[in-house]
């Protein structure tokens, strides 16, 4: 068992998850004013040792309804269901994903440095 290699693999998987999370959050921010858009959320299945699968799930929270009978997406009563995306929530999620990505990157770099040091010792 190579614990340094395992650490590097886990950090890479963590960076992959956070990268996907940043992408989904960006899509949500882009559609904050799109009527009818539902917020996407990344769901990661797995345990602490390994991520088994990632899937995108739509937030089932209803968007705010606005009265605008002239809007092309208005229902029979003249209401338009707006996006259920909160810009504040998305910015907080983006910040958390960025910080978690950086933490995984630092872990990967530390493991790489340790691996390089080990190789240097073995070469002597």
Image (tube, rainbow, N blue to C red):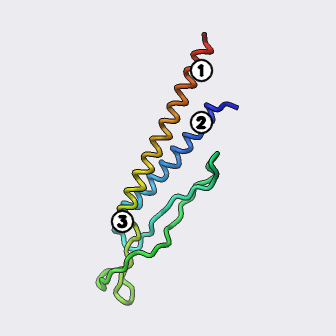
Q: Quadrant of residue 81?
A: bottom left
Mark 3 or mark 2, which is nearer to you?
Answer: 2
Where in the figure is residue 120, as x and y percent of width and height? 57, 16
Tell me which label, 1 or 2, sits earlier in the chain. Answer: 2
Q: CA distance from mark 1 to mark 3?
A: 49 Å
Q: Which residue is mark 3?
A: 32
Q: Which residue is mark 2?
A: 7
Where in the figure is residue 31, as x and y percent of width and height? 37, 64
Q: Residues within 10 Å of mark 1 (few under 14, many from 20)?
A: few
Tell me which label, 3 or 2, sits earlier in the chain. Answer: 2
Tell me which label, 1 or 3, sits earlier in the chain. Answer: 3
Q: Secondary structure at mark 3?
A: loop
Above or below: residue 123 compared with residue 106: above
Report the residue at 49% width, 61% height from top.
41
Outermost residue to the top: 124
Q: Secondary structure at mark 2?
A: helix
Report the residue at 41% width, 61% height from top.
28
Where in the figure is residue 4, as x and y percent of width and height? 61, 31
Q: Which residue is mark 1?
A: 118
Q: Which corner quadrant holds the C terminus?
A: top right
Q: CA distance from mark 1 to mark 2?
A: 15 Å
């Amino acid at each position: 068992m190579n614990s340094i290699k395992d650490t590097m693999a886990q950090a890479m998987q963590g960076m992959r998850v956070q990268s996907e999370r940043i992408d989904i959050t960006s899509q949500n921010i882009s559609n904050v004013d799109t009527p009818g858009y539902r917020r996407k959320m990344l769901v990661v299945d797995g345990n602490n040792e390994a991520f088994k699968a990632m899937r995108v799930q739509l937030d089932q929270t209803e968007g705010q309804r606005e009265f605008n009978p002239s809007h092309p997406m208005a229902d029979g009563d003249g209401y338009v269901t707006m996006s259920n995306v909160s810009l504040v929530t998305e910015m907080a999620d983006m910040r958390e994903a960025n910080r978690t990505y950086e933490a995984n990157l630092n872990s990967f770099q530390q493991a790489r440095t340790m691996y390089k040091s080990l190789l240097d010792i073995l070469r002597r």
